[in-house]
Structures are given as structure tokens and as C-alpha cells.
Image (cartoon, coloured by chain):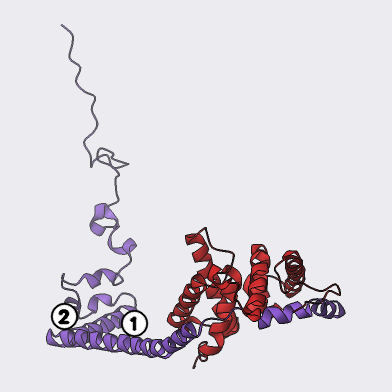
Chain colours: A red, B purple
Amino acid sequence: MARRDPLARPEKLIPLVYAYVAYRIGSGPDADDVTSETMEHAYRYRERYDPAKGEPMAWLIGIARNCVADLVARREDVVDEPAPESATEEMEEEAMRRLSLTRAVARLDERERELIALRYGADLTARQIAGVLGLRPNAVEVALHRALGRLRAELEGDPTSELRPSTSGAVRF
Amino acid sequence: MRVFRHRTDEYGDLERQLRSHRPRPSRALLDQLVAEAPARRGRSRNLVAGRLALAGFLTLILLAALAATGGVSQVASGGRVAAEQVKAVVGAPFGQSKKTDATSTNAASPNGGSLNALAAPADPPGQDQYKPGSGRGDPNEPHTGPPGNNNGFPGRCPPSAPPPVTPLP
């Protein structure tokens, strides 16, 4: 029986893996390295992918989570903040917004950052996240809601944030 | 369901921004990782083909070595003899295994027919080992028990005499 190739379209998967990793540990060389390591493992062990256990993206994120954990174990001083070279005064508005958001995500605790990264970085559904984390989908929804509330509070508390919500509660850009 | 929709709407703008502003890999990194995929795919297939070729090659070497030393015919004849022996032992009726062809037995077992030990005895042990009449089979000559015990046959054993008493000086 021919098995489905989980990496048939890597150009669609790699940006999502990178976004997940960057939400977890911040953009920069570390995120590049972890993404490369993740894809290297995926290329090497692609024969072990079992479609019955989930979508290719969930499989890739499982590998990425292990790579991030390895990095954290190797280096206790993982930078939570984004790379400093991206924080220049000449930064364009778009990059500034992204930086503010990434900073706010980085200030969340590990669990909330993981949920945000899985949902909005890797673009997994609540059901897929539940499969990755071993939780119930309902519990994932509740935890995500709480994480979004914390993220908004972080954005409100950041004086440099371009994403601070207006008084009506909507995010202003 | 309404609760979830309300929750989703509550942070709808924030969610949209989290998606639209998600970090993106550099073009160079993306191109590099995408370019590696076909090469690795081909290498993986080549690896599997190489392993199969190696396994086939080693099997051929093994068969050639067996054929050169006569191992193939030895294995074939050994299997045939073993099958005959099994058939003889299992299929023969009780008490007839001693009539098994000794030649084939010796051929199968180099130590001189150890397969005979596996064959069932011709007579039950109660008939060929425990005979009446001092072991000679005469029913009129019963056992007398241990030496010195006449057991009702006083003439067969010397009378037991007390040891001579030596008077003290």
C-alpha cells in the first residue's frame, strides 16, 4: 500500500513550522536553526509518518516541539525577546506591529505561548492541538481564550505597542 | 456553541493580527529547505534500493558457498533421512521398532544408532526384566529373599549357628 507523503508540498508547511517556532522562542537565528532541524528530521523519518495519527502539519509540529525542547535544554538563556537588530527606529510600521505582537507573545508564560504558537503560528485547529498536547478540545478552547485575554492585557500594558486596543476593545492599527 | 462564537468574536481582531503578522522565514531559508526536499527524497529511495541489493548479494554468496561444499545435497539428503526416521518411529506399531532397518538408522546417527533408544521396547519391562525363580524364569524356584534368609526353604541355606563361645581363662 502506498503511503501518503507528508512532505509532498514543503513550501506550504515550512512557513507554518517557522511561525510556530518563532512564536515559541522568538524570530532570529535560533528559529532558523530549529526550523532547519525540524525539516531535517522530517525528511529523514518521513517513512514513519502514519496518516491515521493525524495530519502532516500536526506530525511536523510534534517534531518541532521536540527540537524546541532540545534547544531550551541546551541553552537555558533562550532569548524570549525578538532579535534586537529588528528593533530600529527606521522600522516600518508593518514590522513595528509585528514586533509589538511578538514581544507581547514572548511575555506570556510557556503554556500560553505554546497554545498561541500552535493555533496562530502552526494554524492547527483546536482538535489538532488537543491531539498534540493530549488535552480535550474543549479544554484547549478555554485555555486559548484565556491566553488571548492575557495577550491583550500585555498589549495594553506595552507603551510602545502599536496593537493596543482602543477603548471599545478592538485592536487598533 | 454560542459561547465559543462569542469568545471568538471577542478576540477576532487580535486573532486576525496573530495570523497575518505571524513570523515568516526568510526567503533564503525557505528556498534552501524546499530545495533540500527532492534531494533527500531521492537519497531515501536510493538507500532502500541499496539495502535490497546488498541483501540479495549476500544471499547469492551464501548459496554459492553452500553449493561449493556440497551443502545443498547434504541438507537435502539429511532432510530425507530425518523424514524417514520420523515416519518409522511414529508410524511403526508398538513392539516393532527393533525391526527398523539398521542401515538407515546408522546413516542418520553417526554414533551407531542412537535412534534405537527412541524406539519403543519389544516387551514391557515387567516381562523381560523381573522374572521369577531367582531371575532365571523358573516358576517352581521362588525367591528366597536376601542372602541368609531361607524363607521356608531350610535346605537351601546353611543353618544359622551361634558364634562359638570361647571360655575365659
x, y percent for residue A1: 49, 93
Alpha carbon distance from label 2 to label 1: 18 Å
Q: Chain of mark 1?
A: B
Query: Few, some or many C-alpha atoms within 10 Å of disc 1 (few <14, some 14-19, many ≥20)?
Result: few
Rendered-image quadrant of the N terminus of chain B: bottom right
Do the residues marked 2 and 1 share a common chain? Answer: yes
Q: Earlier in the sequence, mark 2 or mark 1?
A: 1
- Find residue A29 and name its label: none
Badge 1 amino acid: Gly
x, y percent for residue A26: 57, 70
Task: Please say whether residue A88 is visible from this viewpoint.
Answer: yes
Q: Residue furthest bottom?
A: A2
Q: Choose between A62 and B70: the one closer to the eye.
A: A62
The residue located at (75%, 74%) in the rendering is: A141
x, y percent for residue A94: 65, 81
Q: Residue furthest top?
A: B169
x, y percent for residue A164: 76, 72
Q: Which residue is mark 2?
A: B103
Badge 2 amino acid: Thr
Q: In the image, A55: left or right of B7?
A: left
- Under circle 2, the secondary element is helix
Rendered-image quadrant of the C terminus of chain B: top left
Q: In the image, A60: left or right of B74?
A: right
Q: Which residue is mark 1?
A: B91
Query: Few, some or many C-alpha atoms within 10 Å of disc 2 (few <14, some 14-19, many ≥20)?
Result: few
Q: In the image, A123: left or right of A33?
A: right
Q: In the image, A97: left or right of A73?
A: right
